[in-house]
Image (cartoon, rainbow, N blue to C red):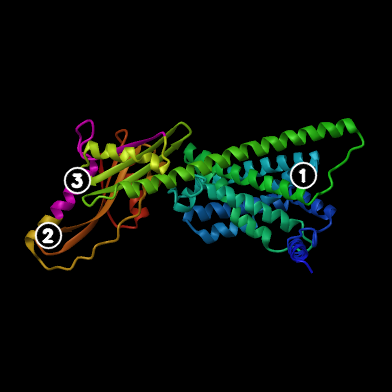
Amino acid sequence: MTKKFRESRIWRTVRITVQRRFNLNSDKADEGEVITSITKSSEFKGANLWTLIFAIFIASIGLNVNSTAVIIGAMLISPLMGPIMGIGLGMGISDFDLLKKGSRNLLIATMISIATSTLYFLITPLHDAQSELLARTTPSVWDVFIAFLGGLAGIVAATRQEKSNVIPGVAIATALMPPLCTAGYGLANGNLLYFAGALYLYFINSIFICLSTFLIVRFLRFRKRHFEDKKYERKVSRYILLITVITVTPSVYLAYRIVDKSIFENNARNFVRDAFNFNNTQVVSRNFLYQPKQREINLLLIGAELADTAIARIRAIMPQYHLYNTQLVVRQGLNAKQEIDFSQIKASILEDVFRQDSSRQVNVPVTTPPPPPDLTGELKVLFPNCQYYAASPMVFRRSDSSNTDTCMVVMAGFSRKIKPAEKIKVQNWLKTRLSVDSVKLVIQ
């Protein structure tokens, strides 16, 4: 037996083994049964409609009280996957009636879901945006991957003879319900940024599930629908092709934008970590702005001020981190209007506290509280006029005793003067979000 023959035999064995292991046709269900099942799940009336409404209420409550378990439960009973997979199947088998039915029912389900969640958030006494809700306002590249891979898993499971728990798992992973509830929250509270961001995430999830369904249906070579009237068949084929192009084109653009944004933010984080590593100067707040024609890194520094030449040298190394056409904005010390920056005040307070503590030389054990979380992103979403923010737990000693008090000092700058009622709202939100008894809010 020659060496060449042995190698060809080994490769043939490997190929046969791989084909047998990864063959999707081995346990595929009857095509008619698959089409009937998906068509039936695409319908929204009767039990399906009431199930959707109840699931929306449950998901809204979960987002409102920040309960992950409740949100997962709502996604498990949600029937939203049906019409999305119906659209993908309709495109895959050139069934224009199924395509229209899926699109119509998806639109109805979306409108009912937003209306239901809006009604809930109008009547609920809890109006603060929790972290679970905020997470559904800005899609990331991982949402694209999850929706696409989840859609692949979902349609593969739907075409099997034996049904499994894959479909409920896909419903949880792709998270179609929470964005719709977040959109309702945005409408109920007049926050169009929440509404638009949540619908954007919902659109991404839907379009990539639909696209993955179309790809698997074509991979499994489902028989396309044939018509007696060839002229009508050509017309339907043109419509299907047009809808497929309309579906695929924005998905490619959205994926590119989200991936590009994620790469930019990762490069920006690495740049800030490496370039602003000083002993006497620290970055207390960072904000990355990504737009198609504008990219900006906005930093707030405390401690020793950096010279203009040092900042210029830092800007010069930005191309090393692939930060081309990116503006670096550094704020420190006094701003252009010669107004005292909040970071300067914070540094002065800290220096004064430590100076008084050292001068008294009282050996009273003080437990330093853990640093508060970075809420810059949440603050800018909740209060768009907020320009910068910093928080630090301060330990104060009473002048008449050796007792100490700890207070959370928060300093924030707004682009316009805020009303007392707004200040109270910001202060109450900070107390809840930081889980502290009292907050001293200094508005710049």
Any mark on residue 201, and which? none
The CA distance from mark 2 to mark 1 is: 73 Å
Residue 305 is situated, as x and y percent measured from the top left of the image, at: 20, 42
Circle 1: residue type: Gly
Q: Using the rendered image of the protein, determine whether residue 421 is visible from the camera's viewpoint.
A: no
- Residue nearest the viewer, comparing 55 with 30: 30
For marks 2 and 3, give the CA distance: 22 Å
What residue is shown at x 69% (from left), y 55% (from top)? Answer: 154
Q: Which mark is residue 92?
A: 1
| Amino acid at pointer 2 | Asp
Tell me the magenta residue range: 325-353
Res. 365 visible in picture: yes
| Residue that mark 3 sits on | 304
- Residue in the picture at 45% in, 50% down: 125
Find disc 2 in the rendering and name its residue.
357
Q: State left or right for residue 312 relative to residue 213.
A: left
User: In the picture provided, is 216 more to the left or to the right than 32?
Assistant: left
